Amino acid sequence: AQSVTQLDSQVPVFEEAPVELRCNYSSSVSVYLFWYVQYPNQGLQLLLKYLSGSTLVESINGFEAEFNKSQTSFHLRKPSVHISDTAEYFCAVGFSGGYNKLIFGAGTRLAVHP
Amino acid sequence: DAMVIQNPRYQVTQFGKPVTLSCSQTLNHNVMYWYQQKSSQAPKLLFHYYDKDFNNEADTPDNFQSRRPNTSFCFLDIRSPGLGDAAMYLCATSRPQGTASTDTQYFGPGTRLTVL
């Protein structure tokens, strides 16, 4: 069975500091990997995704994530965070033959402090 | 702007009293999903529609039903809500563009259900 583990439920960080949100998955079949972000009182929005090709994927607002097959990880990073990055971040896995199904992690709440 | 809309944003019901949550979309997407998200837990897929084709997850309780009268609307019916059904309910949509598992899902803001 497939599963997703987000190792940190909360990550506090100061503005302009780097951050890494960790995500590990378990699957016996090929996977597709996603990061979604949820700002307060809003729905989840796609931040970035890995389908194939280059293992490093980037978002338009400076986040990046690297697919590491040997470590079954898809950690999200940003070299310098802003107050506006405060949100909940969800890692999700879609899998070959999964027919539209995503398995989500429990989320990591990123709190950026001035 | 094209979007996914959920009504109401907050719903309070009594134990055992049927309740219906609504989702509408202006994206004209084929697939609509319902997720249940309990506090500090991952969103959990209940079921989804691919056009009119209903796909129920194996572990979704019978207490949860869904209707999709047309492309734009999808409803979640909870026939006899229990205290354990209090959660955020998320609606999402997607447009298949190849391998289904690669599709981006577009989420509404959710409906928070309280059961008294």
Image: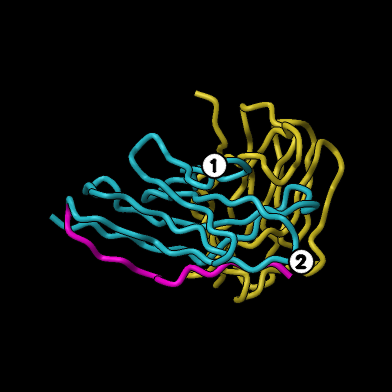
Chain colours: A cyan, B yellow
Task: Work out which quarter of the rendered image holds the N terminus of chain A and state it.
Answer: bottom right
Judge whether residue B42 is colored magenta: no
Which residue lies most toward the top here? B1
In percent of width and height, residue B109 lies at: 49, 46
Q: Determine whether label 1 and label 2 are within 8 Å by CB.
A: no
Residue B30 lies left or right of residue A91; in this view the side is right
Q: Residue at x 73, y 34 (%)?
A: B96
Q: Residue at x 63, y 43 (%)?
A: A52
Count residues near mark 1 (Cα–Cα under 10 Å), then give few for <14, some for 14-19, many for 20+: few
In percent of width and height, residue A54 lies at: 54, 42
Type of amino acid under label 2: Thr
The chain that hosts pointer 1 is A
Q: Secondary structure at mark 2?
A: loop
On the same chain, marks 1 and 2? The answer is: no
Question: Measured along the vertical axis of the image, is residue B11 above or below residue B75?
Answer: below
Residue A68 lies left or right of residue B69; in this view the side is left
- Per the rendering, the mark at residue B60 is 2
Which range of residues does the magenta coloring cover? A1-15
In percent of width and height, residue A102 lies at: 66, 54
Type of amino acid under label 1: Ser
Judge whether residue A11 is colored magenta: yes
Which residue lies most toward the right here? B53
Look at discs 1 and 2 and give the one toward the viewer: 1
- Per the rendering, the mark at residue A54 is 1
Question: Measured along the vertical axis of the image, is residue A36 above or below residue B39?
Answer: above
Q: Residue at x 45, y 59 (%)?
A: A75
Q: Secondary structure at mark 1?
A: loop
Residue A88 lies left or right of residue B70; in this view the side is left
Q: Residue at x 59, y 52 (%)?
A: A33
